[in-house]
Image (cartoon, rainbow, N blue to C red):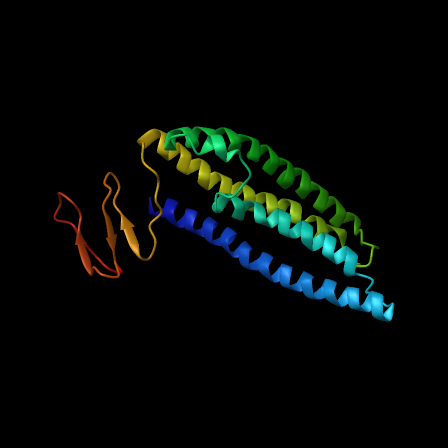
């Protein structure tokens, strides 16, 4: 179970950091577009790469944000019906919807990856202002698909766990320990050592 927890936390951490990446991109885009507007309308000297860069970075945000949306459970759905379901009912709906997500992931990773590899072999370079190799631009497809697929796998695992056990799967972190088959939670900030229920096993903080 430790390996599962570490894997889930790693995937969650990667997609959580996409929030920071998107924030940096938005800041950069805002400054670049502001400069481009001033340069165009006051000096009649807009940048050659402004429009192309803004379109590409907008696409980057859309693709790398998919995994983050699933992590935060903010993807599009009809909440007026979904909210009325029980936890198991929600898990079943999520399970079905994630099957369609995986179809998208397959297309992005395999088709997108193949297209990127083809562009790399041909050495195609963009000629629309931001003159960089096209494979760099299109690499957002397999990268975004991978982030989306990994986070969807985490959610799929949790849904299956809920349907089988009837309990939500909780990932332990540095502050709390969740004991399987119980609802007990221990805060390691306030507890130096704990005893597992019905046993003489002692777990010390940091062990």
Q: Nearer the viewer, residue 191 or 207?
A: 191
Q: Position of residue 43 (x, y in %)?
A: 86, 71
Q: Nearer the viewer, residue 155 or 150?
A: 155
Q: What residue is rendered at 83% in x and 55% in y?
A: 128
Q: Which of 181 and 122 is in front in this view?
A: 181
Q: Quadrant of the N terminus?
A: top left
Q: Picture quarter containing residue 192? A: bottom left
Horizontal relation, residue 32 to residue 65: left or right: right
Q: Position of residue 109 (x, y in %)?
A: 62, 41
Q: Picture quarter containing residue 164? A: top left
Q: What residue is rendered at 52% in x and 48% in y?
A: 68
Horizontal relation, residue 159 to residue 174: left or right: right
Q: Where is residue 103 in the image (x, y as percent from the top left)?
A: 59, 32
Horizontal relation, residue 73 to residue 2: left or right: right
Q: What residue is rendered at 36% in x and 34% in y?
A: 162
From this viewpoint, which residue is outermost toward the bottom? 43
Q: Which of 102 and 185 is in front in this view?
A: 185
Q: In which quarter of the image is the C terminus?
A: bottom left
Q: What residue is rendered at 69% in x and 41% in y?
A: 114
Query: Total label count?
Result: 0
From this viewpoint, which residue is outermost toward the right? 44
Q: Where is residue 121 in the image (x, y as percent from the top left)?
A: 76, 48
In the depicted structure, whether residue 182 falls above or below residue 51: above
Horizontal relation, residue 153 to residue 164: left or right: right
């Amino acid at each position: 179970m430790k390996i599962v927890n570490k894997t889930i936390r790693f995937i969650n951490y990667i997609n959580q950091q996409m929030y920071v990446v998107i924030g940096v991109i938005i800041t950069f885009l805002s400054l670049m577009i502001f400069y481009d507007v001033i340069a165009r309308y006051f000096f009649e000297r807009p940048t050659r790469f402004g429009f192309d860069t803004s379109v590409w970075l907008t696409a980057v945000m859309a693709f790398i944000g998919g995994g983050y949306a699933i992590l935060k459970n903010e993807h599009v759905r009809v909440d007026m019906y979904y909210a009325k379901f029980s936890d198991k009912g929600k898990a079943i709906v999520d399970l079905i919807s994630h099957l369609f997500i995986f179809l998208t992931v397959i297309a992005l990773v395999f088709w997108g990856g193949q297209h990127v590899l083809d562009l790399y072999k041909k050495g195609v370079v963009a000629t629309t202002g931001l003159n960089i190799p096209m494979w760099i631009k299109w690499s957002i497809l397999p990268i975004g698909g991978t982030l989306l697929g990994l986070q969807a796998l985490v959610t799929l695992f949790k849904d299956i766990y809920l349907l089988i056990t009837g309990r939500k799967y909780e990932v332990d972190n540095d502050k709390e320990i969740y004991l399987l088959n119980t609802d007990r939670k221990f805060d390691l900030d306030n507890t130096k050592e704990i005893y597992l229920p019905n046993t003489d096993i002692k777990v010390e903080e940091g062990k």
